[in-house]
Image (cartoon, helix red, strand yellow):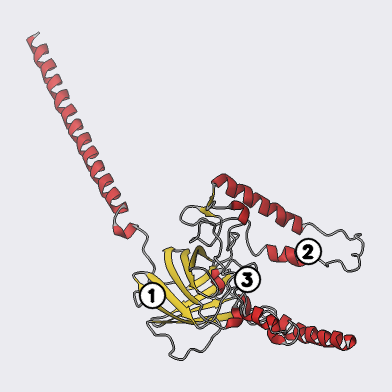
């Protein structure tokens, strides 16, 4: 019996020691696991894991690449929306659905048995419209996490504060008695294959070829717009020219404010004024701000100052998105102005001769 008690005691002691060893081993495993988890968590929160702005060899934000600036968000807010600045998620989805339905209708084949149009009726461009409509996907792009109802952001109603009675280059020309067909200067710039869009194309949403390429070095940033192959050369750290010579897309200079490139332009050609988008006078000045907010997004802001054309200065903002590698910028061969313009002017002269 004593021997049995001693053996039993020895067994219990051995079991206890073994249990303590296992406990210590498990405790150490848990301890080191917690340390590993803590280090891993800290590594995830280190500066190296936070998005870093890509930079050029000169240390400045690198904007280079091909970008898409088309948008289904209009420049001005539709008047029926009043002061409504944003759409809800549900409203945005409904709008995108209606956009897609419209594209589907445009894609539908035309009836080959349709009759001829009535005399004097407007001839539609259904096939052309269907082709153009697919330049913009049927979706709204969020800005600061919200679906904006307009690009214009400085006014409550999202509208441009045009000055009543202002006459731009084209209005003054018509007021002088000149007709649009009296010479090539009377035709719009896009029809003549000279310029397209606003004073600077990226200010406004566009339907056709809304792509641009940015190339930069330490002293220059060049924005090449695919639509009518416009190249805008922006001088960084320079002064405006001392001689006020009007130029297409103005005289742009830029400076860095932290990681934002601020561009100031003036001395625009007065022919660039557009009653539909951005009107301008000789006093027109434009300030733009380019900020990389992600690898594939540029936050683009602009402010217009022109006391002749507007009641007050106004601003807008939008997002430019990086194109996929296969979406390159191609040469835009514009021929309409080369072939159509002589016919337009010749037709006007023939009509005048028949009326005399």
Q: Quadrant of the C terminus?
A: bottom right
Q: Residues within 10 Å of mark 2 (few under 14, many from 20)?
A: some
Residue at 42% of width from left, 66% of height from top? 292
Q: Quadrant of the N terminus?
A: top left
Q: Nearer the viewer, residue 213 or 267?
A: 267
Residue mark closest to the camera, 3 vs 1: 3
Residue at 47% of width from left, 63% of height from top? 297
Residue at 62% of width from left, 59% of height from top? 137
Element under disc 2: helix
Sequence-earlier tag: 3 or 2: 2
* Residue 209 - label: 3
Residue 335 showing in the rendered view: no
Q: Position of residue 229 (x, y in %)?
A: 60, 80
Identify the residue under disc 2.
126
Q: Position of residue 27 (x, y in %)?
A: 20, 35
Q: Position of residue 268 (x, y in %)?
A: 53, 82
Residue 349 showing in the rendered view: yes
Using the numbered discs, state the Cα–Cα distance from disc 3 to disc 2 in whole angstroms.
19 Å
Q: Position of residue 152 (x, y in %)?
A: 53, 62
State the residue lying farthest toward the bottom: 243
Using the numbered discs, state the Cα–Cα distance from disc 1 to disc 2 in whole angstroms.
46 Å
Identify the residue under disc 1.
56
Q: Residues within 10 Å of mark 1 (few under 14, many from 20)?
A: some
State the residue lying farthest toward the left: 2
Q: Residues within 10 Å of mark 3 (few under 14, many from 20)?
A: some
Q: Nearer the viewer, residue 226 or 157?
A: 157
């Amino acid at each position: 019996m004593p021997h049995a008690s001693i053996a039993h005691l020895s067994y219990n002691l051995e079991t206890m020691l073994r249990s303590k060893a296992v406990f210590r081993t498990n405790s150490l495993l848990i301890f080191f696991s917690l340390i590993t988890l803590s280090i891993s968590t800290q590594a995830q929160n280190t500066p190296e894991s936070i998005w870093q702005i890509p930079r050029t060899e000169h240390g400045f934000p690198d904007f280079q690449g091909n970008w898409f600036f088309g948008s289904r968000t209009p420049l001005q807010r539709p008047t029926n929306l009043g002061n409504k600045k944003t759409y809800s998620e549900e409203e945005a989805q409904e709008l995108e659905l209606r956009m897609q339905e419209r594209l589907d209708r445009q894609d539908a084949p035309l009836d080959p048995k349709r009759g001829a149009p009535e005399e004097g009726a407007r001839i539609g461009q259904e096939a052309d419209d269907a082709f153009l409509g697919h330049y913009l996907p049927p979706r709204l792009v969020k800005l600061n996490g919200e679906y904006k109802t307009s690009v214009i952001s400085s006014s409550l109603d999202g509208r441009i504060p045009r000055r009543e009675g202002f006459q731009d280059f084209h209005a003054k020309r018509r007021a002088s008695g000149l007709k649009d067909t009296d010479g090539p200067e009377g035709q719009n710039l896009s029809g003549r294959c000279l310029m397209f869009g606003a004073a600077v194309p990226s200010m406004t949403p566009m339907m056709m070829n809304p792509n641009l390429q940015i190339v930069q070095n330490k002293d220059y940033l060049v924005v090449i717009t695919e639509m009518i192959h416009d190249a805008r050369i922006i001088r960084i750290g320079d002064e405006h020219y001392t001689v006020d010579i009007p130029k297409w897309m103005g005289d742009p200079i830029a400076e860095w404010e932290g990681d934002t490139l601020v561009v100031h332009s003036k001395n625009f050609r007065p022919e660039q004024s557009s009653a539909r988008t951005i009107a301008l006078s000789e006093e027109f000045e434009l300030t733009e701000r380019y900020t990389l907010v992600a690898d594939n997004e540029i936050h683009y802001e602009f402010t217009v100052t022109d006391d002749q054309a507007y009641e007050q200065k106004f601003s807008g903002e939008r997002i430019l998105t990086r194109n996929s590698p296969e979406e390159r910028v191609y040469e835009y061969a514009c021929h309409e102005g080369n072939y159509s313009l002589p016919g337009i002017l010749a037709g006007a002269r023939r009509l005048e001769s028949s009326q005399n």
